[in-house]
Image (spheres, rainbow, N blue to C red):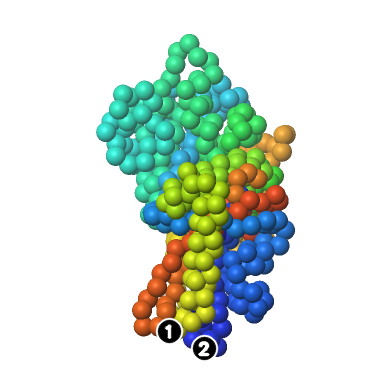
């Protein structure tokens, strides 16, 4: 839990900027003293924000490089790199073995790849590699790579990954594409595609692209989208039914925005969300343990007798009360200062389009048909569809204030043990507090 106390200039009311890190996600709030009551303490604030969180006590932490540890935890939620699959499907191929068994792709797919990004040599590639080998060539010589709105994207192209003669399942290809969350399926001609053709615990959504008049001046692409039932709708919505795009920048920006937003939406699916929550809980437990250990070492309590431990505990309590008391005398602070610990997600444009899902708006243009796939779903491009605890629950509190003419800053880390995780707040979506979608022009 991170706190920053100050007073509003207009009404002189005390308030606190609060960041609460839970195994279920991260909450950001501005809390006023009138909302909590007369006793405006970190424990009261925590119980106000998360009523179901059974907090027995708070553990103040005072040690050097506290902010570095907290920032390192928060940085796990910054998502600026993405990896997606790109699968080549010939006419009549309806099995996983046939999809991954294509040694090469057509000139039409080659044209589509150059539209989508840059075909780069993997040797000594310095950017995001998405698990591909850039030193010894064990995952092929080339890959499809692109940067888009400050994000790095790499594609696991089925025909660029190594082909193994005596392996009908082509496991080396599947180990990359099968661990992606979203993939594009490229078709030269209209042929049925079912998501169940590919067995994977991670693939949750597919964008099917069928080329029309490839390698000509009038090349167009027909696009369809499908996802699992528990994946929320995501934008940008398909412009029409069927959705047909001309070759060019508009199609590229649509597909890249759709891919990134689709992965964000897939993070809310039950299976992926549980995996992220487990990872987040482990990271939270580790940083809490490290902060406690450093505090004991810094306060020289780890090897002290019981009496000295109690004395040190009283000292920490005294420092906490002094910091809180100083806050009540604070004057002249900015109206809305930034929190001491940076938010866990970089700000992005909030709107994609007027008919597109945003981070706080669950509505989607109803004019676009939506279909979720089940075990017997078959998607053909001829009919376009768009589908769009463990450890401590509170870890840090940082309090800063002004006393008289002299600025006083006191960093205090507060951690506690929780018997119940509330599950309140936004889910973390790849460890982000609230996933924000990329803008599509």
Looking at the image, tell me whether mark 2 or mark 1 is earlier in sequence order. Answer: 2
Q: Is residue 334 above or below residue 66?
A: below
User: How far is mark 2 from mark 1, CA to CA?
Assistant: 11 Å
Disc 1: CA contacts within 10 A as few (<14), some (14-19) or many (>=20): few
Residue 243 in sight here = no
In the image, 349 versus 289, the foreground residue is 289
Name the residue furthest top.
166
Residue under label 2? 10
Position of the C terminus, as image quadrant, is bottom left
Image location (x, y in percent) of residue 222: 53, 46
Disc 2: CA contacts within 10 A as few (<14), some (14-19) or many (>=20): few
Name the residue furthest bottom.
10
Badge 1 element: loop
In the image, 122 versus 126, the foreground residue is 126
Number of the label disc, if any, that sits on residue 408? none
> Are the residues tagged 2 and 1 within 8 Å (C-beta)?
no
In the image, 131 versus 357, the foreground residue is 131
- What residue do we see at 61% from left, 73% from top? 40
- What residue do we see at 54% from left, 31% from top? 178
Q: Nearer the viewer, mark 2 or mark 1?
A: 1
Image location (x, y in percent) of residue 353: 53, 64
Residue under label 1? 332
* Residue 376 shown left or right of residue 239 in the figure: right
Image location (x, y in percent) of residue 98: 55, 22
Image location (x, y in percent) of residue 84: 48, 40
- What residue do we see at 66% from left, 51% from top? 418
Q: Is residue 206 above or below residue 252?
A: above
- What residue do we see at 45% from left, 57% from top? 62
Position of the N terminus, as image quadrant, is bottom right
* Residue 408 shown left or right of residue 195 in the figure: left
Name the residue furthest left.
124
Badge 2 element: loop
């Amino acid at each position: 839990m991170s706190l920053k106390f100050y007073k509003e200039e207009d009404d002189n009311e005390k308030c606190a900027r609060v960041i609460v890190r839970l195994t279920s996600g991260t909450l950001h709030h501005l809390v006023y003293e009138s909302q909590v009551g007369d006793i405006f303490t970190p424990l009261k604030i925590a119980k106000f924000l998360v009523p179901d969180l059974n907090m027995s006590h708070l553990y103040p932490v005072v040690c050097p490089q506290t902010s570095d540890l907290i920032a390192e935890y928060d940085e796990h939620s910054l998502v600026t790199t993405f990896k997606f699959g790109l699968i080549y499907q010939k006419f009549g191929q309806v099995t996983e073995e046939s999809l991954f068994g294509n040694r090469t792709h057509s000139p039409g797919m080659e044209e589509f790849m150059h539209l989508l990004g840059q075909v780069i040599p993997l040797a000594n590639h310095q950017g995001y590699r998405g698990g591909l080998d850039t030193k010894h060539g064990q995952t092929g010589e080339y890959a499809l790579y692109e940067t888009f709105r400050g994000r790095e994207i790499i594609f696991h192209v089925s025909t660029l990954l190594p082909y193994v003669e005596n392996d009908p399942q082509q496991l080396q290809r599947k180990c990359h594409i099968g661990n992606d969350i979203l993939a594009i399926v490229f078709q030269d001609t209209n042929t049925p595609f079912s998501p169940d053709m590919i067995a994977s615990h991670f693939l949750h959504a597919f964008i099917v692209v069928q080329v029309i008049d490839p390698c000509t001046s009038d090349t167009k692409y027909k696009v369809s989208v499908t996802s699992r039932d528990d994946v929320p709708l995501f934008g940008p919505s398909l412009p029409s039914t069927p959705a047909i795009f001309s070759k060019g920048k508009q199609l590229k920006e649509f597909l890249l925005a759709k891919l990134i937003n689709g992965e964000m939406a897939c993070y809310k699916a039950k299976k992926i969300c549980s995996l992220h929550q487990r990872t987040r809980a482990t990271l939270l437990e580790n940083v809490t343990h490290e902060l406690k250990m450093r505090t004991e070492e810094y306060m020289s309590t780890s090897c002290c007798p019981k009496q000295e431990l109690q004395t040190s505990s009283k000292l920490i309590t005294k420092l906490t009360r002094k910091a809180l008391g100083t806050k009540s005398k604070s004057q002249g602070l900015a109206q809305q200062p930034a929190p001491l610990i940076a938010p866990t997600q970089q700000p992005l444009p909030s709107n994609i389009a007027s008919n597109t899902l945003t981070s706080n708006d669950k509505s989607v243009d109803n004019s676009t048909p939506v279909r979720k796939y089940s075990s017997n779903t078959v998607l053909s491009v001829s009919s376009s569809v768009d589908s769009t605890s463990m450890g401590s629950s509170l870890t840090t509190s940082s309090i800063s204030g002004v006393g008289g003419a002299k600025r006083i800053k006191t960093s205090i880390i507060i951690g506690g043990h929780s018997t119940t995780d509330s599950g309140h707040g936004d889910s973390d979506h790849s460890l982000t507090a609230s996933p924000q979608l990329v803008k599509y022009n």
